[in-house]
Amino acid sequence: MRPFRTLLLNGSYEPLSTISWQRAITLEFREKVDVVERYDAFVHSPRSAWQLPAVCRLKRYIHVPRHPVRLSREGVLARDGGCCQYCSVRLTRTTFTLDHVLPRSRNGRDTWDNLVAACSPCNRQKGDRTPEEAGMALLSTPYRPRWLAVGRGEQVHIEHHALWEPWLRAA
């Protein structure tokens, strides 16, 4: 079975972390969470079958100290799902470039709202023009994330299911 992960939301529907599907089912049986979304996959016992939880919300709010997400190359790559925001080719830490949506030559700043991950060919093609001027469309609008799973020992490329997307964007 593919290693399914479950997105865990706080009582206020803010993303907290990811947990294993086994932990999510345990929390569901202990009535600690409400399952908000489910995968189209099941786990079976001799007498029962359970649909795997994709997104769970804690029934109680947990106070988590807020720390702003620092702007970094790895953070932009993680926010953009490890894909070029112009052609959707998969990128790695070593093969991606940062593109300024509003070019630096036009006073474009190094901010979450102005930086996207791009492959070198797309970045060269765009040059010092805006995406509209270059005839290139962004796959998604850049935004400042409220949290990212980037840190020591963690992979930058974040695999997540489409069912998570509304909950990650809302944060």
Image (cartoon, grey):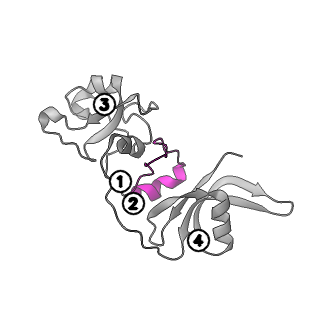
- Which residue is farthest front? 152
Estimate the x, y position of residue 113 in percent, counting from the top left.
26, 47
Quadrant location of residue 109?
top left
Tell me which amino acid carries mark 3.
Met
Magenta stretch: includes residue 157: yes
Please give the range of residues in magenta. Answer: 147-171
- Where is mark 2, residue-wise? 171
Rendered residue at 69%/72% (across/down): 29
Pinpoint residue 162: horizontal percent, then vertical percent: 52, 49
Circle 3 or circle 2, nearest the eye: 2
Which is nearer the N-term, disc 3 or disc 2?
3
Q: What secondary structure is found at the residue carrying circle 4? A: strand
Mark 1 surroundings within 10 Å by alpha-carbon count, few (fewer than 14), some (14 through 19), many (20 or more): many
Badge 3 element:
loop
Residue 42, relative to residue 138: is it above or below?
below
* CB under 8 Å between discs 3 and 2: no
Which residue shows up at 47% across the image and 52% down it?
165
- Name the residue tied to disc 3: 136
Characterize the magenta stretch by its predominant secondary structure: loop
Residue type (three-letter) at the residue carrying disc 2: Ala
Discs 1, 2 touching: Cβ within 8 Å: yes
N-term mark: 2 or 4? 4
Residue 145: numbered disc: 1
Q: Are marks 3 and 1 in contact (CB under 8 Å)?
A: no
Task: For the C terminus, give its image quadrant.
Answer: bottom left
Of tags 3 and 1, the one toward the viewer is: 1
Which is more N-terminal, label 3 or label 4? 4
Q: Regarding mark 2 in the picture, which secondary structure is present there? A: loop
